[in-house]
Amino acid sequence: MYKLIIGSSDFKKVMENNGYYIDKTMLIKDVLEEGKEVVLLPRPRRFGKTLNMSMLYYFLNVEEKAKELFKGLKIEKEEDIMRQINSYPTI
């Protein structure tokens, strides 16, 4: 059963604790395929900006081993994108 995790903007914590998550992982594909130097995400407060940045961090960061976090999510079906998981130095 899924849990409602209130106030957490850490993607890893939400996924590991089986929290409710609306799958926005295709944002990863959009960011990688655009190839832009800067990505601007203007959204109202409490709209998931920090959670999305956390998701990008865990997907891209070379120091993380996060393939399990993305199991069963839409991005997992994108083979070209999944080859890039944990391949970039990230701050």
Image (spheres, rainbow, N blue to C red):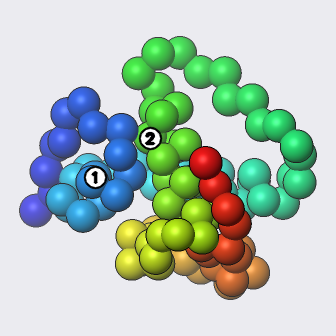
Q: Amino acid at mark 1?
A: Val
- Pick the front one: 29 or 58: 58
| Residue at the (75%, 81%) spot, across then down | 80
Q: Which residue is mark 2?
A: 51
* Of callouts 1 and 2, the N-terminal one: 1
| Residue at the (46%, 26%) spot, across then down | 47
Q: Quadrant of residue 85?
A: bottom right
Tell me if mark 1 has few (under 14), some (14-19) or many (20+) residues whose alpha carbon lies within 10 angstroms of its own: some
Label 1, secondary structure: give it: helix
Q: Are marks 1 and 2 in contact (CB under 8 Å)?
A: yes
Q: Quadrant of residue 26?
A: bottom right
Position of 71 relative to 50 (above/below): below
Q: Quadrant of the N terminus?
A: bottom left
Q: Which residue is mark 1?
A: 14
- Pick the front one: 56 or 63: 63
Tell me if mark 2 has few (under 14), some (14-19) or many (20+) residues whose alpha carbon lies within 10 angstroms of its own: some
| Residue at the (41%, 21%) spot, across then down | 46
